[in-house]
Image (cartoon, rainbow, N blue to C red):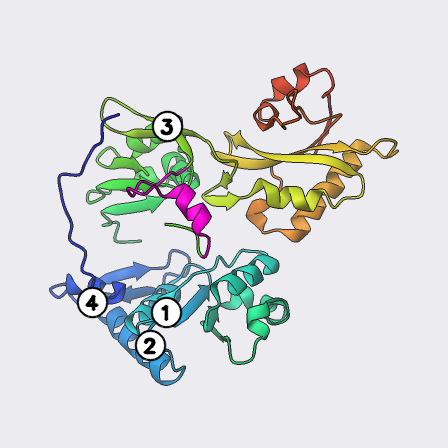
């Protein structure tokens, strides 16, 4: 396989924080030029005001909250200017930012806090109702003096780079509003987190003919998994299957790993299986990702075999299983692919579960002992 190297080398300074580095190349930018704009609220931040607020907030973090270089700060909030400002202020003050998705289930947030062990946890109004459960459920949060919790309360169309996920790519490619405007400065899209369907890629190239489309370390405190992912010579094993076309573009079409990618979010089948097996009527379960053309992403689907002589209607049991999962996980982990009740899970002669067969409806119907019974 040919290895393609970039013709341009970019030197990255190692003596500056991200926030300081960001300000080095904008000395000649007019201070009133807008750098960020919130699409929903219309709130804007200019270069001059934003950089001044970074330094002011960093000063507050150091003097009022006693933030010291190397301290970890976790932020869990909606995408907004205050989020970006807070992150840059932490970097400016010498701290480490470890974000946590604010849409996670409270148990998942507690797990993240116990893993990261931040000294400061900053949230917005989307997490106000979860704070009591966090204080009670997180072992790290319960430790005295270990963590403090605080709260934070584009018309220009001149972007040169757009970082997106497949679901956003589909929306942009098919939105009639996009066609009403021109984007003369947009140079390329960077689409990552999940495979991009070729049909969507073609539509996106048609909607933005002047822009190139590019599809693109380590596990905290888990050197074994890190070693599996990053080779000794620095290559990253993503777990994706793909090919290199004659123009030098990579096309990703499947995954080697079982991890399900829903709109860029990772969903571990084992996590959902461990919840489903708690249902008193479930004998065996397997969760796989299936492709949804409508959502342009993978969605989780559960295949379940029930215990003998359960005496229940399969459809009602399937609904109970879906509701059980929904009550214990974040929204993006729900069983959007449904719950299928089957007689038995397909296995080979050694008893190994054949999850690849479960991804194909036709394969299930062709297995004599695995007739489809119901779907939710």
User: Mark 4, mark 1: which one is toward the viewer?
Assistant: 1
Label 2: which secondary element: helix
Closer to us: 275 or 106: 275
User: Mark 4, mark 3: which one is toward the viewer?
Assistant: 3
Closer to us: 1 or 224: 224
Question: Which residue is label 4 attached to?
Answer: 32
Question: Real-space Cα distance between discs 2 and 4?
Answer: 20 Å
Examine the residues drawn in magenta and state their main secondary structure: loop
Q: Earlier in the sequence, mark 3 or mark 2?
A: 2
User: Mark 2, mark 4: which one is toward the viewer?
Assistant: 2
Where is residue 316, by image quadrant?
Answer: top right
Q: Is residue 12 left or right of residue 154?
A: left
Where is residue 277, by image quadrant?
Answer: top right
Disc on res. 242: 3
Q: Earlier in the sequence, mark 4 or mark 1?
A: 4
Question: Real-space Cα distance between discs 4 and 1?
Answer: 20 Å
Question: Which residue is label 1 attached to?
Answer: 86
Question: Real-space Cα distance between discs 4 and 3?
Answer: 45 Å
Instruction: For residue 192, say whether it is visible.
Output: yes
Q: Is residue 247 above or below residue 180?
A: above
Question: Looking at the image, do the residues carrying marks 3 and 1 touch, with CB atoms under 8 Å apart?
Answer: no
Instruction: Tell me if residue 230 is in the magenta stretch.
Output: yes
Question: Looking at the image, do the residues carrying marks 4 and 3 touch, with CB atoms under 8 Å apart?
Answer: no
Q: Earlier in the sequence, mark 2 or mark 1?
A: 2
Farthest-out residue, bottom: 63
Label 3: which secondary element: strand
The 10 Å Cα crowd at callout 2, few under 14, some 14 to 19, many 20 or more, is some
């Amino acid at each position: 396989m040919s290895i393609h190297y970039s013709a341009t080398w970019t030197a990255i300074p190692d003596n500056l924080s991200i926030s300081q580095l960001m300000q080095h190349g904008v000395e000649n930018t007019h201070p009133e030029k807008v750098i960020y704009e919130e699409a929903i609220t219309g709130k804007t931040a200019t270069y001059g005001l934003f950089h001044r607020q970074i330094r002011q907030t960093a000063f507050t973090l150091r003097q009022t909250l006693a933030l010291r270089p190397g301290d970890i700060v976790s932020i869990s909030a909606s995408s907004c200017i205050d989020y970006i400002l807070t992150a840059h202020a932490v970097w400016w003050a010498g701290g480490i930012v470890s974000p946590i998705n604010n849409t996670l289930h409270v148990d998942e947030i507690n797990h993240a806090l116990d893993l990261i062990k931040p000294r400061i946890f900053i949230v917005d109004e989307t997490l106000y109702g979860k704070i009591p459960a966090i204080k009670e459920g997180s072992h790290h949060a319960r430790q005295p003096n270990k963590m403090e919790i605080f709260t934070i309360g584009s018309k220009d169309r001149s972007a040169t780079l757009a970082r997106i996920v497949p679901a956003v790519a589909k929306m942009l490619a098919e939105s009639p509003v996009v066609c009403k405007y021109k984007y003369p400065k947009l140079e390329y899209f960077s689409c990552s987190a999940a495979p991009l369907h070729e049909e969507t890629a073609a539509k996106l190239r048609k909607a933005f003919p002047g822009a190139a489309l590019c599809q693109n370390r380590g596990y905290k405190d888990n050197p074994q998994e890190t070693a599996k992912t990053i080779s000794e010579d620095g290559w990253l094993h993503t777990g994706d299957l793909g090919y290199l076309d004659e123009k030098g573009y990579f096309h990703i079409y499947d995954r080697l790993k079982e991890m399900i990618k829903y709109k860029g979010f990772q969903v571990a089948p084992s996590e959902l299986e461990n919840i489903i097996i708690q249902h008193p009527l479930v004998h065996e379960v397997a969760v796989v990702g299936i492709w949804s053309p409508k959502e342009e992403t993978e969605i989780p689907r559960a295949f379940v075999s029930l215990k003998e002589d359960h005496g229940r209607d399969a459809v009602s049991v399937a609904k109970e299983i879906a509701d059980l999962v929904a009550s214990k996980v974040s929204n993006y982990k729900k069983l959007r692919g449904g719950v299928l009740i089957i007689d038995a899970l397909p296995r080979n002669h050694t008893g190994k579960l054949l999850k690849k067969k479960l991804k194909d409806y036709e394969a299930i119907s062709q297995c004599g002992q695995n007739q489809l019974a119901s779907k939710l």
